[in-house]
Image (spheres, rainbow, N blue to C red):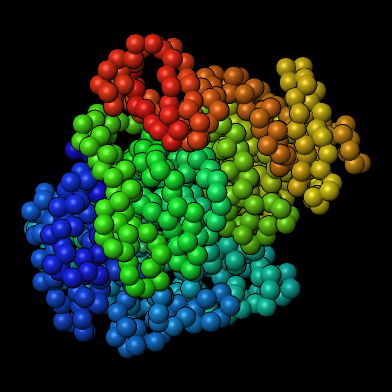
């Protein structure tokens, strides 16, 4: 049974409405709900007094319709009585302001009193629900994030450094504290990077960001330990925020979870625009799948207009279903819509659920009900099937944090550049895993390592053996610049990657927007290709590599900008400039061809992905446009929605529609 459901907040509605809600959910094909994630005050109305009676009743109403329950631990939104008792538990922002009560995520994850109260509510819930037959799993907290700069964190940071470095001497050495006389004689002298005026030592700042990430990982572990102990038969997950969230090392965060779940919103108040870019959602999904190398759930799939202060453009007819199928096409084994009914009160009054404020089932409900019926029929064929991309992109949180400390160029953005390359692959319908630089690369033909700023010997060895064994590596500017401690390497760039890419960076130039000029492709295979240099230019001195393209302007006109090196049985391509969309439209087909990756179907407006169930291939064809799109297939295939073999290999996909074919 495909896991299909909704996030439900029964505590926000009169209990005599619950039975109607449960019936409507069941009629929509829902078999799972997430409950209780913000209901701490209802479950512990005063210190140490727990009341689960209302939740028991809601669960039994839902169970009567065979709806399973995921319980959220409520620690993202503490009760007012708790925070009033521990004013030190409020998080301190980077600008020094201690937040007050009145939103959510206002707590410091290192605060001992907050940790203790978190333990108590999670233990109480786990004791109460461990053997309840309706409960299948847990979501811990909600969307971990936000760095804290309070005194408790500073002390915890100093202790964390004590664990990380053998001694203060070693820290002083690795951080280069001789610069500006920063040598520390005592751990307690080490400051937080938020209070140094401006521009702290990059080593200090990077370590603080790592520490903040580790703080949430450790805080989450407190809850995992309790739940593993008391509820061994339940799964444990957390809802993450896709590729875009950059303050936590998600690879670390998910390590002890059973699977990743995440929140998928495409129309939000913050991205107030008409056009929705399917490549962004695809990148989110591919990142979430890559974190554990396995299928994920979408714990919050958009159900209506997003909006806190401003209401987003309404999801157009067909979009909710299309986006939910897109999640499935990229590896979702569970979809829950956020939220069931639009709240009448609170910050999220305009964050629309499947039902509007008045609870009348309307257009959005009907659309998802159709999907529920479809999944009832075909969900089992999809569940557990896997995505097997030939291409990996390496996501380095260390490098991302390092660029947050030092942008290098005002227009150099780790996420944007990563997306630029991903987008080029997505346009060609080539499927991608987003994984860590230390992950096993042997399953891939092409590995892309954008802005791999921090390179450890372990990462370099991983890339080297991948290329030696016949893989193709694409990397480039600002890679291999830093060591693990955010110090610049003392060899020619790209440092530990030099021998793999067969070049040295002779010099570099950081460009203003008006300085970019055309590149000239000199490799005969790429003759006539176009692309511009932009943002940054590494001026390359080939050692072993051949030149692919040269600059045409500035004092380095004629010097190599892009190179290719044959290394072992593989090859490594170095791109010294950020470039524009044209550059990757030129380079990627060539790279894919040379690395033995079949280009997907580059069908404009159609996204095409595959999941594999044994040796059966499920082809998802998604039309993200407002026009019907035609596609020609190589073979006849079974159309799962009609349970019919197509009688021709030409297929017409209606606007915002999806087809799933079994081949
Ligand atoms: C998510 C969050 C939900 C809800 C939603 C809409 O980020 O997990 O609780 O706030 O956004 O704003």
Residue at left offset 16%, top offset 48% = 26
The N terminus, quarter of image: top left
Total numbered circles: 0
494 above or below 152? above
Q: Position of residue 350 (x, y in %)?
A: 41, 64
Residue at left offset 45%, top offset 77% = 91
- Along the horizontal axis of the image, is 647 left or right of 273? left
159 above or below 68? below
Would residue 336 be seen by someone viewing this image from the given angle? no
Q: Position of residue 592 (x, y in %)?
A: 58, 23
Residue at left offset 40%, top offset 43% = 317
Ligand 1 placement by image quarter? bottom left
Q: Nearer the viewer, residue 334 or 403?
A: 334
475 above or below 108? above
176 above or below 361? below
Q: Position of residue 166 (x, y in %)?
A: 51, 64
- Along the horizontal axis of the image, is 637 left or right of 548? left
Q: Nearer the viewer, residue 326 or 415?
A: 326
Picture quadrant of residue 565: top right
Q: Position of residue 597 (x, y in %)?
A: 53, 21
Q: Nearer the viewer, residue 414 or 17?
A: 17
- Along the horizontal axis of the image, is 461 left or right of 320? right
Would residue 410 be seen by someone viewing this image from the given angle? yes
The C terminus, quarter of image: top left
């Amino acid at each position: 049974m495909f896991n299909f459901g909704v996030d439900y907040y029964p505590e926000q509605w009169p209990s005599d409405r619950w039975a109607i809600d449960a019936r409507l959910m069941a009629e929509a094909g829902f078999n799972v709900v997430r409950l209780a994630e913000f209901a701490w005050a209802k479950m512990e109305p005063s210190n140490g007094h727990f009341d689960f009676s209302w939740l028991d009743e809601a669960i039994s109403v839902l169970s009567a319709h065979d709806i399973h329950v995921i319980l959220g631990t409520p620690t993202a939104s503490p009760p007012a009585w708790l925070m009033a008792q521990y004013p030190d538990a409020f998080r301190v922002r980077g600008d020094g302001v201690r937040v007050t009560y009145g939103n959510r995520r206002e707590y410091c994850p290192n605060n001992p009193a907050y940790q203790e109260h978190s333990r108590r509510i999670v233990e109480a819930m786990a004791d109460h629900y461990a053997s309840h037959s309706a409960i299948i799993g847990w979501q811990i907290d909600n969307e971990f994030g936000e760095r804290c700069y309070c005194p408790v964190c500073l002390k915890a940071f100093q202790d964390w450094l004590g664990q990380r470095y053998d001694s203060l001497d070693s820290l002083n050495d690795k951080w280069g504290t001789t610069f500006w006389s920063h040598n520390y004689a005592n751990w307690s002298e080490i400051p937080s990077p938020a209070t140094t005026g401006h521009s702290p030592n990059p080593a200090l700042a990077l370590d603080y960001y790592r520490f903040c990430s580790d703080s949430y990982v450790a805080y989450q572990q407190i809850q995992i330990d309790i739940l593993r102990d008391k509820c061994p038969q339940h799964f444990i997950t957390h809802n993450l925020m896709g590729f875009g969230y950059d303050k936590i090392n998600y690879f670390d965060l998910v390590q002890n979870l059973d699977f990743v779940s995440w929140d998928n919103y495409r129309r939000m108040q913050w991205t107030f625009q008409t056009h929705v870019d399917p490549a962004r959602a695809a990148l989110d999904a591919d990142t979430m799948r890559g974190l554990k190398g396995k299928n994920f759930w979408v714990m919050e799939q958009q159900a209506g207009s997003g909006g806190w202060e401003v209401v987003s453009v309404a999801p157009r007819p067909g979009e909710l279903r299309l986006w939910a199928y897109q999640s499935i096409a990229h590896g979702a084994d569970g979809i829950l819509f956020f939220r069931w009914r639009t709240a009448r009160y609170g910050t999220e009054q305009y964050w629309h659920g499947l039902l509007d404020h008045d609870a009348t089932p309307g257009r959005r409900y009907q659309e998802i009900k159709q999907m529920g019926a479809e999944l009832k029929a075909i969900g089992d064929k999809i569940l557990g099937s896997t995505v097997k991309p030939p291409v990996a992109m390496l996501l380095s949180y260390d490098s991302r944090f390092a660029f947050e400390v030092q942008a290098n160029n005002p227009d150099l953005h780790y996420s944007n550049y990563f997306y630029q390359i991903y987008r080029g692959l997505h346009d060609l319908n080539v499927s991608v895993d987003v994984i860590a630089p230390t992950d096993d690369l042997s399953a891939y033909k092409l590995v892309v390592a954008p802005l791999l700023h921090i390179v450890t010997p372990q990462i370099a060895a991983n890339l080297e053996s991948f290329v030696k064994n016949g893989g193709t590596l694409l990397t480039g500017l600002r890679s291999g610049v830093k060591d693990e401690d955010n110090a610049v390497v003392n060899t020619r760039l790209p440092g530990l990657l030099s021998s793999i890419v067969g070049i040295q960076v002779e010099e570099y130039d950081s460009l203003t927007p008006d300085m970019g000029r055309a590149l000239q492709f000199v490799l005969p295979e790429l003759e006539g290709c176009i692309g511009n240099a932009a943002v940054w230019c590494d001026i390359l001195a080939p050692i072993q590599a051949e030149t692919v393209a040269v600059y045409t302007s500035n004092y380095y006109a004629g010097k190599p900008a892009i190179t290719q090196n044959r290394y072992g049985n593989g090859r490594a391509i170095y791109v010294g400039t950020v470039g524009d969309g044209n550059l990757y439209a030129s380079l990627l087909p060539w790279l894919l061809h040379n690395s033995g990756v079949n280009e997907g179907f580059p069908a404009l407006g159609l996204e095409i992905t595959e999941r594999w169930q044994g040796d059966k291939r499920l082809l998802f064809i998604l039309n993200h446009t407002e026009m019907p799109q035609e596609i020609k297939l190589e073979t006849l295939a079974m159309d799962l929605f009609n349970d019919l073999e197509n009688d021709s290999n030409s297929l017409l996909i209606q606007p915002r529609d999806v087809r799933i074919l079994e081949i």
